[in-house]
Amino acid sequence: MINLDWPNVKLLCYMIILLNYIILLFQVIDLSEIPPEGALEWCLFLPHVTWRVLVAGGDGTVGWVLSAIDKLKLKVSLLY
């Protein structure tokens, strides 16, 4: 459970703005707005490009994204 009191919301908003500044805007995807399948579909259009996916969330979010990768049959190389 995330504590959404004002300081945490403020920090979360700052982190999103910072990520959007560091990473191009179209590369940061809010999964509450777009499901992982929709976010990962663009990987299908450029199959010879190496993509890296960073998931910020808990086990459920990571599982959701991994299921979408499996459903889309994307080629996967895991980095640890």
Image (cartoon, rainbow, N blue to C red):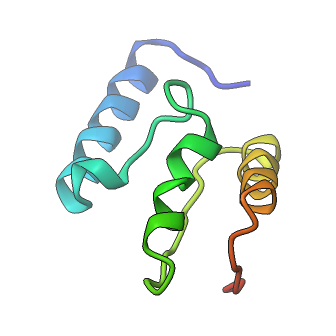
Give percent across and percent down for residue 29: 43, 43
Residue in view at x 71 percent, y 80 percent: 76
* Depth check, front residue: 5 or 71: 71
Q: Quadrant of residue 74?
A: bottom right
Residue in view at x 82 percent, y 51 percent: 63
Asked if residue 47 is positioned above or below residue 69 in the image, the reply reads below
Asked if residue 45 is positioned above or below residue 48 in the image, the reply reads above
Q: List the single residue furthest toward the front.
A: 45
* Depth check, front residue: 57 or 64: 64
Give percent across and percent down for residue 48: 47, 87
Q: List the single residue furthest toward the top.
A: 5
Q: List the single residue furthest toward the left.
A: 21
Residue in view at x 49 percent, y 12 percent: 5
From the viewer's perspective, tell me whether residue 72 is left or right of residue 25: right
Quadrant the N terminus occupies:
top right
Asked if residue 37 is positioned above or below residue 4 in the image, the reply reads below
The tally of labels here is 0
From the viewer's perspective, tell me whether residue 74 is left or right of residue 60: left
Quadrant the C terminus occupies:
bottom right
Give percent across and percent down for residue 49: 43, 83
Asked if residue 48 is positioned above or below residue 31 in the image, the reply reads below
From the viewer's perspective, tell me whether residue 29 is left or right of residue 13: right
Give percent across and percent down for residue 22: 22, 61
From the viewer's perspective, tell me whether residue 59 is left or right of residue 56: right
